[in-house]
Image: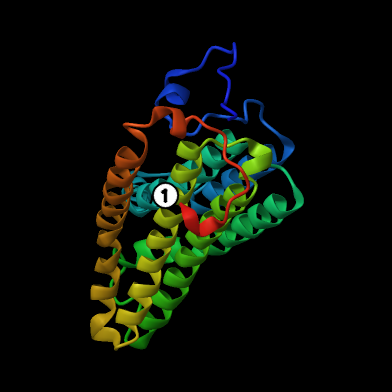
Amino acid sequence: MIFRRNGGEKKTKKEQKDIIAWRGHEVTRIEAFSDAVFGFAITLLVVSLEVPKDFGELVHAMKGFIPFAVCFALFFQVWCAQNLFFRRFGLHDERTLTLNAMLLFAVLFFVYPLKFLFSAFFVPHAIKGYEWVELMYVYGGSFAVIYFLIALMYHHAYRKRASLKLTHSEAFETKTYMYRNIGVGMVGLLSIAISSLGPEYAPLGGLAYSLIGIVVGLTHSKRGKIHRKKFEHQPELGNQVMDDVPLATH
C-alpha cells in the first residue's frame, strides 16, 4: 500500500483546513495572466473614471456603487473558485490552459450583461417586456457556462489523480467540488427555463439564484456524510494514494 507522506513544509491555516493538500505554492504565468484578466473585468465594472465635479454628480455616482458592489462580489466568488483550484492542484497542462482560457473569455463576456442587469434596477423603464427574457437568457447562459467550466477543471484534476498523487479523501473532495459547480451552473439554466415562460416570469427567474446557497449546502451536507462514513473509521484508507480507478467509483 502507498501512503502520501507528510512533507516537511510548514502549512498555512488555510492549507491545514483544506481536505485537499495544496500543490500549487508559486504563482504561475497562467495565474498571473488570469489575475490580469479579472482585474480588467473589474475595471469595466467601475462606475466612472472621472471624479465628480459637483455634489449632484457625486450623488449620481454613488447610486452606481450598489450594482458595482454586487457585481464585484460575484466576480470575486469566481476568482476565489479559480484561485482555489490552482492552489489545490497546481496544474498547467494543455487541457487546463484551454479550460482556463475559456473561463476567462466567459468572465469577460459576462461583464456587461451583469453590470446592465443590476444597473437596470435603478433606471426606470431601462428594460421592457421580452427584453427582460432575452437579458436573463444572456445572463443565465454566461453564469452557467462559467460554473460548468470550473466543474470541468475539477473533472480534469480527478482524471489526473494518479499523477497528482491524490489520496482517496482528496479525490472524493475533488468530485464534491465538481458536483457543487455543476449544481450552481444548473441554477443558471433553471433561471433561463423559468424566464422563458414570459416577461412576467423574469423576476421569478432572477429569484432562482437564491437557490445557490441551498444547492451548495445540500451538496456538501450529503457528500460530507458519505465522506465521514467512508473515511472516519478508516483514516488509513483516506490517506492512501489512489490508483487509476474508474471515475464512477467515488
Q: Residue at x 43, y 30 (%)?
A: 18
On screen, residue 174 above or below 23: below
On screen, residue 87 above or below 201: above
For mark 1, does the 10 Å Cα neighbourhood hold few (<14), some (14 to 19), or many (20 or more) residues? many
Q: Residue at x 42, y 49 (%)?
A: 176
Question: Residue 52, image x and y in percent?
Answer: 43, 44
Find residue 29 and report its image quarter.
top right
The foreground one among 88 and 197 is 88
Residue 205 horizontal side relative to residue 156, left or right: left
Question: Residue 4, image x and y in percent?
Answer: 57, 26
Q: Which residue is mark 1?
A: 176
- What amino acid does circle 1 point to? Thr
Find residue 209 and report its image quarter.
bottom left
The foreground one among 171 and 103 is 171
Question: Residue 225, image x and y in percent?
Answer: 27, 44
On screen, residue 225 above or below 5: below
Question: Residue 85, image x and y in percent?
Answer: 55, 42
